[in-house]
Image (cartoon, helix red, strand yellow):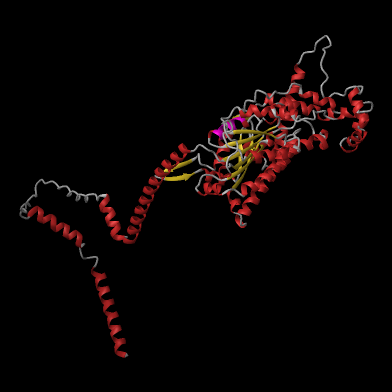
Amino acid sequence: MPILENIQERLESAEDYIYVSFSSVKAEMPNIQEALNRLWADVSRFGPTIPEIRLPVLGDFEIPPPPPPPPPPPPTSLIDTATDWAAENPWKASGLGVGVVGIGLLVGYNAYRARTQSRFHRKSHTASHERRQVVVVLGGDHPVALPLILALEKKGFIIIASVATPEAVDELECVGNGYVKALVLNPFEPGTIPIFLRSLASTLSHRFPINIHGDPHASPATHPFIHSVISLFGLTRFSALTPLEHVQLQSEYLKYFNATHITPLQIIQALLPLMRNSPSRARDSIKNGKSKKSIVVCVQATDAHVGLPFLGPSSMSAAATLRGVEVLRREVRVAAATGGSEGMSDINVVSFEVGALDVPPFASRHLLDHSPKEYTQSWTPSEKLAYGPAWEIALEGPAHFQRKAQKADVFVDDVLQVVSYGRIRSVSFCGLRLNTWSVFDWMRGGRYAVGSGALTSCIVSHLPGALLDIIISIPYTLLSVHRALSQNRTPAIASEPELPAPPYTRPSPPEAPADVGKESTDSPQTSSERDGSENGSEADVESNDGAGVGESWISLKPDSTRISESSEGTAEGTAA
């Protein structure tokens, strides 16, 4: 290693020597850059001239534009595109071709079949004009029944309608062309139900039209069969607006409940076996896609869902009827799904919730010839003070809040759709018959809302009870404020005016009339029952000292004329 150390020392000594030598002569050496500049100045001043060298110039030229893009390929036609797609997807193309050919054959066959059937039906229609399908209309003397009966007869049905009085039989049968038969059935008298059923069974063996000459009885092979039952009894309103506290449950309400709830259900019970055990011709017509049998029950929409004040009897009966129809519809569907009877699957149970309809009344149906305030004469003073103002506001309500009634044609059209099971609204597309009505019927679930305010009542019924009570009380609050302001603005008259006593003022105890005293004397048990069961208020008893027992109740006619006639009067206006 001494050799490497010697080399290192020699290099360091050489570096020191060079550095010292350069530092000693650095001050005397001229600057190299200055020397070069001085040399260039001397050469350019005293030296020869440098020749000019000219380089050739390229001259003016233009840059050529870029070449245009190549033209797009020609568009392929639809046939080429389809051919390419079929070559890429052979299985899909073959399946699509088979489907198109099958649909074309089906459409062509349906068109040929439709033409053949139309010719066959035209020949059979010209050869025989007999009708088989019977529609039973309960409540044929209701105002909405007349346009419904005329529309059903026009569509080719036989109509057997019920009327309350024998006088209305000829009046209703004269509007038809021999295919309308009227039978007497008073819903307020249960004793007429067996008579009506016997008359109905006898009518089904008659030949239609009934105005032709010859043998009135038809052969058993051509007997008509019951196709549909339509009940309009639920559209009858109670006779008067009255608080529930004042309703005579054992007499008035029981008679009304029997007419609007028990009687139609009892008729349906008797006719349901006939509809289930239908003859072979009826089953063949159903299998051919003509129609299904139907049971249609109509109720007041407002009474069935909301229940307005002073309409307690109508609301209770309508709600009970609607729930009974729902149970019957579910029982029929369950029996059709699980039972062995083939006829249950051919029955369609439908409920119609009817609102306000613009229907002209019959010429023979008179409106109320008395003031509705006459019903308050039998109220007790306590009831007049408690319910009088609200009752008067309920009477004045329709005059301030008028609702435009819907035309009765809408109701008639919907009933025809149910009875014919959508044959009217079926459309033909490329030879295929599409029944669009069945889709809407499935969405409605067998419940139809027809008339002004019917759909609103159905929607409002799903609101919470507290909110619904507030909404119902709003018109009464507004009318009470309006009446208070009107009374304050009325100028005072110097002379004492002769005003009638309002129904809610406390009158002096009147003397008992002769007929009331006689009635209380003849039937002491009835008056005692009324005092014990229905007049439970001690204040009413104390305030009625000296008054007859009959003065504490609404005195209505025993027959059903007043109850049925009032459907065009006060109750119809209140529902609007």
Nearer to us in this view, 187 or 483: 187
Quadrant occupied by the C terminus: top right
Is residue 471 in view from this perspective? yes
Q: Residue at x 80, y 35 (%)?
A: 244
The answer to if 267 sits in the magenta stretch is: no
Q: Which residues are magenta?
A: 146-153
- For the N terminus, the quadrant is bottom left
Number of labels in the image equals 0
Q: Is residue 496 left or right of residue 285?
A: right
In the visual, does 21 lie left or right of 314?
left
Q: Is residue 148 visible?
A: no
The one of 340 and 43 positioned closer to us in this rendering: 340
Is the magenta region chiefly helix, strand or loop? helix
Q: Which residue extends farthest front?
A: 214
| Location of residue 460 in the rendering, given as x and y in whole percent from the top left corner | 66, 39
In the rendered view, does 38 fall on the left or right side of 212? left
* Residue 555, picture quadrant: top right
Q: Quadrant of residue 489?
A: top right
- Furthest toward the top, the residue is 495
Residue 550's x, y, as percent?
88, 28
Residue at left offset 24%, top offset 51%: 76
Displayed quadrant of residue 453: top right
> Residue 410's x, y, as percent?
57, 33
Estimate the x, y position of residue 124 in percent, counting from the top left: 46, 40
